[in-house]
């Protein structure tokens, strides 16, 4: 690839990334303000319908019971960690709010989970029990739906009594984006694997639909299923979904175009519902297979191991930021030998450069003659072999480290523990991009850590020995750090911190190797 093509590729990529960020920042809709309603009194009473809303949210099928509560009527319960809001007419959980920071689990028009498709409920009441608070929905037809919200923890016990065997609607499959906006995935689980599909993949035609590609469908049914949760306060697309709504059922649910449903057995059913963070210890307490909903990426096993190490380091230092710093040192020490071999191989290639150019000049007069090019490559390989050098020796250590880098990327983006975890000074949340200020008119965030990371990348590239076209190297010396700096401006601060420390140690290692390296004579 010549210099002109490389320049066009890099500049074009930066323009596309900048345009995408500007458009999403400028035209994203603001989130509506969530309203928390008072809980209903303990004694059952008919629910008085509030004033009609200006825009009715997506709802489950009508109950057909004239005595049922108004579809807009809600009931709210505040527990130790959650604020839960139900639709009285169906008993569906319409909204959950994480009290610690006000994060909403679902969009405003979410259809709800756990609705009983019966005659429609007329009353709602609360009962206090030693294990928690029960929210009970009832009607004159003898149908009853209760949620036992624990005093501590995130696992609700759900019981339904339905003389007519009315279905419990677990997860609704909408026909438009609005009810599941920015919710991520819906999934089913078994003991060893998870089947997941994003809502966008089901509700939109794929890019290659003109070639016959079809929309995806709901994952196969199981007795364990759920969906990603957590839409934040600004109703903008979320990088990560740190929460989940998970069902543990007595038997596999039925699946149809409307979603997942569970049929009572002899008019009765029981199930468990987890509403909480994707945190391994909480999911393990619910049931071990549900730990699979934490998306560690393609190299999941490596990510698990790295996070185990990071947690052990955090237990010693007590701060996730400093834990990442020490963790990076450990990773750098573990890969020290590979990085050393890579740098020495590149230095050795620098020694070969005059002889390599001489051979290339020898064959330059033959132009694009493929036979002569093959002879040139053969002569070059003979030169490397004669001197005991493998020209791919600098690439192999880098390839061996790629699974570690990718696993770290996925892990640092996925773990709940880094959410709202402070580091030092102005860095209050390692799971979010660091923002000192935003560029006027563009809204692009500017942070100190990404700038330092870009500078460290420039220094490391400047120090690293390289062969090839000097003009191309000078161009990439500036453009690559600039591109990575722009990319990391929008990445979580914990991830940027890792790469900054990683680069700083790499600079010290490169300096030490180049200081002690002794060039060896080339035998021609």
Image (cartoon, grey):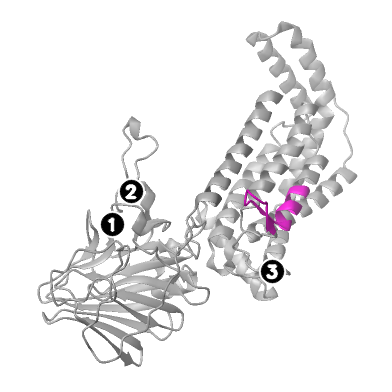
Q: Which is in the foreground here, disc 3 or disc 1?
A: 1
Question: Can residue 107 be found in the magenta stretch?
Answer: no
CB atoms at circles 2 and 1 under 8 Å apart?
yes
Residue 303 disc label: none
Compared to 199, does 350 lie above or below?
above
Q: Earlier in the sequence, mark 3 or mark 1?
A: 1
In which quadrant of the rendered image does the N terminus lie? top right
Tell me the magenta residue range.
437-455
Q: Is residue 47 left or right of residue 428?
A: left
Q: Let me know if residue 284 appears in the view.
A: no
Residue at x-position 36% and y-position 89%: 131
Q: Residues within 10 Å of mark 3 (few under 14, many from 20)?
A: some
Residue 252 in the image, given as x and y percentages of width and height: 24, 64
Read off the residue under disc 2: 202
Circle 2 sits in a helix, a strand or a loop, which is it? helix
**Which comes sooner in the sequence, label 2 or label 1?**
1
Q: Are marks 3 and 1 in contact (CB under 8 Å)?
A: no
Q: Nearer the viewer, residue 62 or 283?
A: 62
In terms of depth relative to the viewer, which is nearer, 386 or 402?
A: 402
Q: Earlier in the sequence, mark 2 or mark 3?
A: 2
- Mark 1 neighbour density, 10 Å: few (under 14) some (14–19) many (20 or more): many
Residue 270 spot, x, y in % from top left: 24, 76
Q: Identify residue for label 1.
A: 173
Q: Which mark is residue 423?
A: 3
Q: In the shown orientation, is residue 447 left or right of residue 106?
A: right
């Amino acid at each position: 690839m010549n210099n002109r093509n490389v320049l066009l590729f890099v500049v074009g990529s930066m323009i596309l990334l900048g345009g995408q960020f500007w458009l999403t920042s400028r035209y994203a809709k603001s989130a509506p303000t969530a309203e928390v309603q008072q809980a209903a009194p303990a004694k059952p009473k008919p629910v008085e319908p509030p004033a009609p809303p200006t825009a009715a949210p997506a709802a489950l099928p009508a109950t057909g019971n004239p005595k049922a509560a108004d579809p807009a009527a809600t009931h709210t319960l505040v527990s130790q960690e959650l604020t839960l809001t139900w639709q009285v007419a169906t008993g569906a959980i319409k909204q959950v709010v994480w009290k610690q920071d006000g994060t909403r689990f679902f969009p405003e028009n979410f259809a709800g989970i756990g609705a009983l498709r019966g005659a429609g409920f007329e009353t709602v009441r609360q009962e206090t029990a030693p294990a928690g608070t029960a929210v009970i929905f009832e009607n004159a037809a003898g149908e009853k739906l209760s949620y036992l919200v624990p005093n501590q923890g995130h696992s609700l016990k759900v019981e339904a009594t339905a003389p007519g065997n009315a279905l419990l609607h677990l997860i609704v499959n909408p026909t438009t984006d609005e009810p599941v906006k920015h919710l991520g995935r819906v999934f089913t689980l078994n003991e060893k694997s998870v089947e997941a599909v994003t809502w966008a993949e089901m509700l939109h035609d794929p890019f290659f639909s003109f070639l016959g590609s079809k929309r995806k469908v709901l994952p196969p049914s199981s007795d364990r299923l759920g969906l990603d949760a957590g839409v934040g306060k600004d109703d903008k697309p979320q990088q990560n979904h740190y929460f989940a709504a998970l069902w543990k059922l007595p038997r596999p649910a039925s699946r149809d175009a409307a979603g997942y449903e569970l049929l009572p057995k002899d008019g009765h059913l029981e199930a468990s519902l987890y509403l909480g963070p994707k945190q391994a210890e909480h999911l393990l307490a619910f049931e071990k297979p549900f730990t699979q909903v934490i998306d560690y990426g393609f190299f999941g096993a490596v990510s698990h191991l790295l996070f185990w190490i990071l947690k052990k380091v955090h237990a010693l230092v007590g701060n996730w930021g400093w834990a990442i710093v020490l963790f990076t040192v450990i990773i750098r020490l573990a890969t020290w030998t590979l990085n050393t071999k890579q740098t020495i191989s590149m230095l050795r290639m620098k020694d070969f450069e005059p002889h390599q150019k001489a051979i290339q000049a020898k064959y330059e007069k033959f132009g694009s003659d493929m036979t002569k090019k093959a002879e040139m490559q053969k002569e070059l390989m003979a030169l490397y072999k004669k001197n005991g050098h493998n020209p791919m020796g600098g690439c192999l250590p880098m390839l061996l480290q790629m699974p570690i880098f990718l696993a770290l990327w996925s892990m640092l983006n996925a773990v709940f523990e880094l959410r709202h975890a402070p580091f030092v000074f102005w860095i209050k949340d390692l799971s979010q991009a660091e923002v000192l200020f935003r560029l006027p008119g563009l809204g692009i965030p500017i942070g100190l850590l990404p700038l330092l990371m870009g500078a460290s990348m420039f220094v490391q590239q400047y120090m690293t020995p390289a062969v090839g076209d000097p003009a191309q190297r000078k161009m990439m010396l500036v453009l690559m750090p600039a591109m990575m700096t722009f990319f990391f401006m929008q990445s979580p601060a914990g991830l940027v911190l890792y790469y900054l420390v990683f680069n700083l140690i790499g600079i010290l290692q490169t300096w030490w190797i180049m200081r002690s390296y002794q060039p060896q004579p080339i035998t021609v």
